[in-house]
C-alpha cells in the first residue's frame, strides 16, 4: 500500500553526472550491483547482534525514472538485492531457504541518474525470522530505506487458501492491447514503463478517466523473463509499485505528489509464484 503526500515545488538539485555504463534493463540493473571492494564490509562497526554493513554500488540512467526520481519499485528491488546478498554473506544456508514475508520502504528523497551506493546489514537473525535493513544513498544522503523480514515456512493446523479474482472481472490478456510507453496516446514522464510489457485495461492516470476513477487495472510483466525466473522476489518488488495511487486518476496533468512509504506482505513464497506462473504475467 502506498501512502502519498503532496509536496510543494522546490528547486531541483543538480543531478550527479550520468555514469558512462549503465544497465540495459531492470534485471541487469538490479542484479548488476557490485560489492564495493574499496572498503571491506568488515570495516564497519558491529552491534550487539553482530551487525556488519555490506556496501554495494551501481549506476542508473534516466530510462529507469518516474518523473525526476528513480521509480520506487526499482529502488526497492535494488535495496532488497543488497539485503539478500548481505544475508547470503552472513548466513549462506539461510539465504537459500528463507523467503521475504514483509517489507516496509521509506522514500526519503529523489534518486537521480548517475551513481548509487547501497548499504545493507542483518539486524537480527532469530530461529524463524531474519530482519535486515537496506538503504540507497546518493550525494552523501539516504534516499531510500527499507526493513525486510524473511522467514521460514511454519507448519500450521489452519490453512486458508488465497481468494482468486473473479474471472468475470478479469479481462483476458489477449483482449487488452499493448500499451506503448511513451506515445502520443499515452504521454508519461514514467520512462521506466518502457522496460515492462504493459497492457493497461482501465484507470489510466492523467486521462481523467472519470467512469473508472476508483479502480485501475492492467496486465503486466517484465520484458526480461530471466530476471523474473531467477530472482523472483526482486522482480515482484519491481512491478508491485506500478499501479498508481487512485487519486492520480482524477488529474489531467502530473501533480506535485510523491509516495513516502510503501508496505508489502507476501503470503506465498515468490519462488512458488514463479512455479505456478512461469510466463510472468500478472493482473494488477
Image (cartoon, grey):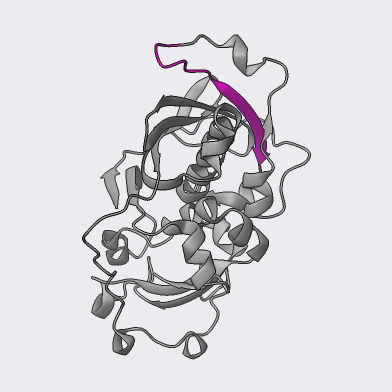
Q: Residue at x 38, y 50 (%)?
A: 153
**Residue at 70%, 37% in the rendered image:** 18
Q: Which residues are magenta?
A: 47-60
Does any portion of residue 186 appear in the rendered image? no
At a point 35% along the width and 65% down the height, the residue shown is 252
Residue 68 point in image, percent of width and height: 51, 44
Residue 100 appears at what percent x and percent y? 42, 47
Q: Nearer the viewer, residue 47 or 145?
A: 47
User: Which quadrant holds the C terminus?
Assistant: bottom left
43 relative to 77, above or below: above
Which residue is situated farthest in the right direction here? 20
Q: Is residue 87 above or below residue 196?
A: above
- Res 20 quadrant in image: top right
Q: How many marks?
A: 0
In front here: 180 or 40? 40
Q: Is residue 137 visible?
A: yes
The residue under the point 31% across, 40% down is 7
- Is residue 73 shown in magenta? no
Is residue 53 inside the magenta stretch? yes
Amino acid at each position: 500500500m502506498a501512502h502519498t503526500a503532496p509536496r510543494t515545488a522546490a528547486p531541483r538539485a543538480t543531478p550527479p553526472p550520468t555514469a558512462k555504463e549503465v544497465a540495459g534493463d531492470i534485471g541487469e540493473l538490479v542484479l548488476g550491483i557490485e560489492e564495493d571492494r574499496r572498503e571491506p564490509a568488515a570495516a564497519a562497526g558491529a552491534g550487539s547482534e553482530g551487525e556488519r554493513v555490506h556496501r554495494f554500488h551501481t549506476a542508473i540512467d534516466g530510462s529507469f525514472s518516474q518523473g525526476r526520481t528513480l521509480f520506487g519499485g526499482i529502488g526497492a528491488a535494488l535495496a532488497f538485492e543488497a539485503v539478500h546478498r548481505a544475508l547470503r554473506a552472513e548466513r549462506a544456508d539461510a539465504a537459500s531457504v528463507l523467503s521475504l514475508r514483509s517489507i516496509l520502504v521509506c522514500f526519503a528523497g529523489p534518486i537521480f541518474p548517475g551513481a548509487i551506493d547501497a548499504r545493507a546489514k542483518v539486524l537480527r537473525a532469530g530461529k524463524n525470522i531474519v530482519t535486515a535493513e537496506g538503504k540507497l544513498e546518493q550525494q552523501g544522503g539516504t534516499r531510500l530505506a527499507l526493513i525486510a523480514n524473511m522467514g521460514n515456512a511454519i507448519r500450521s493446523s489452519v490453512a486458508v487458501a488465497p481468494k482468486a479474482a473473479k474471472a468475470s472481472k478479469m479481462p483476458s490478456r489477449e483482449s487488452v492491447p499493448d500499451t506503448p510507453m511513451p506515445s502520443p496516446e499515452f504521454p508519461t514522464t514514467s520512462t521506466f514503463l518502457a522496460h515492462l510489457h504493459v497492457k493497461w485495461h482501465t484507470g489510466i492516470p492523467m486521462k481523467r478517466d472519470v467512469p473508472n476513477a476508483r479502480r485501475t487495472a492492467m496486465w503486466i510483466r517484465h520484458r526480461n523473463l530471466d530476471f523474473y525466473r531467477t530472482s523472483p522476489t526482486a522482480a515482484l518488488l519491481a512491478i508491485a509499485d506500478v499501479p498508481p495511487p487512485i487519486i492520480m486518476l482524477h488529474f489531467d496533468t502530473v501533480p506535485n505528489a510523491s509516495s513516502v512509504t510503501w508496505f508489502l506482505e507476501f503470503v506465498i513464497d515468490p519462488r512458488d509464484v514463479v512455479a505456478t506462473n512461469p510466463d510472468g504475467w500478472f493482473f494488477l
